[in-house]
Image (cartoon, rainbow, N blue to C red):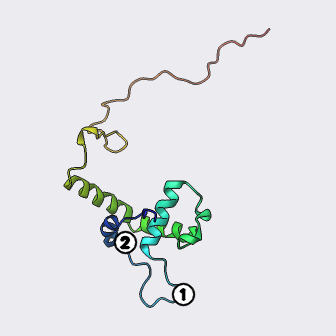
Amino acid sequence: MTKPIVSDELWAIVEPLLPPTRPPGTRGHPPVPNRVALSGIIFVLKTGIPWEYFPQELGCCGMTLWNRLRDWQRAGVWQRLHHTLLQHLADAGRIDWRRVSADAARIPAKGGAPTRGRTRPTGASRGRTTIW
């Protein structure tokens, strides 16, 4: 038997963060369970296969996975999951803070540069043309 993509331990953390699949009383096909969708999304993102090539034998189609990924992004699931997993790792002492780095893409400079420095123009010069 293969190792599941989403372990029971991970699922216990993720499940409370996920919105319901559809409102109660809605008609149509039964929705794909969230655990199956999460496993499929992780599978696609880890393997790099196109969504449309996701094997339906694994429980759903790639378009369903893509829609669920989009819906969860709009609902803020991924950001909440990121913070929750970081908190679990921190509580377990599993984050090595010596290996952490921050860059200006995440943390803005407090005061920024006082003034802009003078730069040389880089446009084409209007110098003489050499003719052979």
Residue 18, labelled with which disc?
A: 2
Of all residues shown, which one is farthest toward the right? 132
Q: In the rendered structure, find residue 28 and report the number of the disc placed on it.
A: 1
Image point 27% across, 37% down: which residue? Answer: 111
Q: Mark 1 falls on what kind of element?
A: loop
Above or below 93: residue 99 = above
- Residue type marked 1: Gly
- In this view, the residue in front, 106 or 64, is 64
Image location (x, y in percent) of residue 120: 49, 21
Mark 1 or mark 2, earlier in chain: 2
Q: Is residue 48 left or right of residue 16?
A: right
Q: Position of residue 95 (x, y in %)?
A: 25, 47
Tell me what residue is drawn at x 53 percent, y 66 percent: 66
Say which of 41 and 66 sits in front: 41
The x, y position of residue 116, in whole percent, is: 37, 29
Among the 4 quarters of the image, the one containing residue 57: bottom right
